[in-house]
Image (spheres, rainbow, N blue to C red):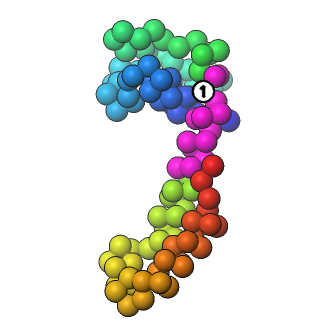
Amino acid sequence: MATLNTKIKKYLEANSKTWEAEQNNIILQNDGSGDYIHTWNVSGLAKPTDEQLATYESSAQTEENNNVIRHTRKTAYGDIGDQLDEIYKDIDAWKARIKSIKDANAKE
């Protein structure tokens, strides 16, 4: 299940807003029974209902899954300096290594 934060991000994007621009206008809270929107001060955009946010579950979950994959890939790729050295020595071996990392960690 996707986090409330990611579903809100998707809701904002669908309404021509960004999390980066609006994050100070939104306060999430958890009183022990799950996250909820405590404060919503996004100009020109109504606070989403639970039903509206639920429509973003699939795309939000895909984004979260892909973020994990991106992190895994980044770790497996290694240091950029080492990659440049590897490219200089044998670009075809580097390409094959990168392809195997991407194949083993495919995005959704």
Whole-percent x, y for residue 85 in the image? 34, 85
In which quadrant of the rendered image does the N terminus lie? Answer: top right
Taking the view exactly as shown, the residue that stands out farthest to the front is 92
Judge whether residue 32 can be spotted in this image.
no
Residue 60: % across, % down = 58, 35
Quarter where residue 104 is shown: bottom right
Can residue 54 be seen here? yes
The residue pinned by badge 1 equals 56
List x then y, in percent, for residue 18.
38, 28
Say which amino acid is labelled 1: Tyr
In the image, 89 versus 45, the foreground residue is 89
Give the magenta part as a residue range. Answer: 54-67
Residue located at (49% from left, 77% from top): 95
Residue located 41% across and 11% down the image = 45
What is the chief secondary structure element of the magenta stretch?
Answer: helix
Relative to 14, residue 77 above or below: below
Residue lying at 60% horizontally and 53% vertically, measured from the top left: 107
Residue 90: % across, % down? 42, 88
